[in-house]
Amino acid sequence: MMRVITFGTFDVFHVGHVNILERARLHGDHLIVGVSSDELNMSKKNRYPIYSQQDRMHIIRSLRCVDEVFVEESLELKAEYIKYYNADILVMGDDWQGKFDHLKDICQVIYLPRTPSVSTTEIIEIVKSDHNP
């Protein structure tokens, strides 16, 4: 069985999230998803997610293509998560291209293209501008 692992915040869930998760699942038989904790998101993006950690995990867990979900507490622990979940393949969006190549000694690393014209940050900015003229 090929085990695939991926990570993300998955805030303001959109079609780009579905696309990358479905494409990640195509690389193996079992998809494990690390959902960034609220605190990790604050440290990465200097803001808390719109949806709570529990809600984001519930959304991801409910998807047919996802087999397992856990909380990602730190970007520096990727190697430990990969080993703990016995992942054969790490899949990330190509906005992370090259940043996880150092993990190729413990698993295959695949970067998938992001869905064009959709991002959580852009969606949040559009919503803010529509509600705050």
Image (tube, rainbow, N blue to C red):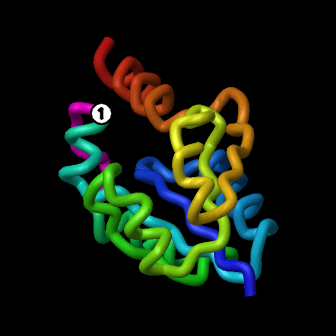
Q: Is residue 83 left or right of residue 3?
A: left
Crowding near the residue tagged with mark 1, few <14, some 14–19, many ≥20 C-alpha atoms within 10 Å = few
Which residue is found at the position 29% from the left and 18% from the top?
132
Dot 1 amino acid type: Lys
Q: Please, which residue is most extreme toward the top here?
A: 133
Is residue 88 located in the magenta-colored stretch of the structure?
no
46 vs 27: above or below: above
Mark 1 secondary-structure assignment: helix
Q: Does any portion of residue 71 appear in the rendered image?
A: yes
What residue sits right under mark 1 in the picture?
45
In the picture, which quadrant includes the C terminus? top left
In percent of the image, x 80 and y 68: which residue is there? Answer: 26
Residue at point 52%, 37% (across, down): 99
**What type of secondary structure mainly makes up the magenta span?**
loop
Indicate whether 48 appears above or below 61: above
Outermost residue toward the bottom in this view: 1
Q: Nearer the viewer, residue 10 or 105?
A: 105
Whether residue 64 is visible, yes or no, is: no
Q: Is residue 47 on the magenta stretch?
A: yes
Q: Position of residue 47 (x, y in %)?
A: 22, 36
Q: Residue furthest front?
A: 105
Magenta range? 45-51
Residue 64, position as x, y percentages in the image: 67, 79
Q: In which quadrant of the rendered view does residue 5 lie?
A: bottom right
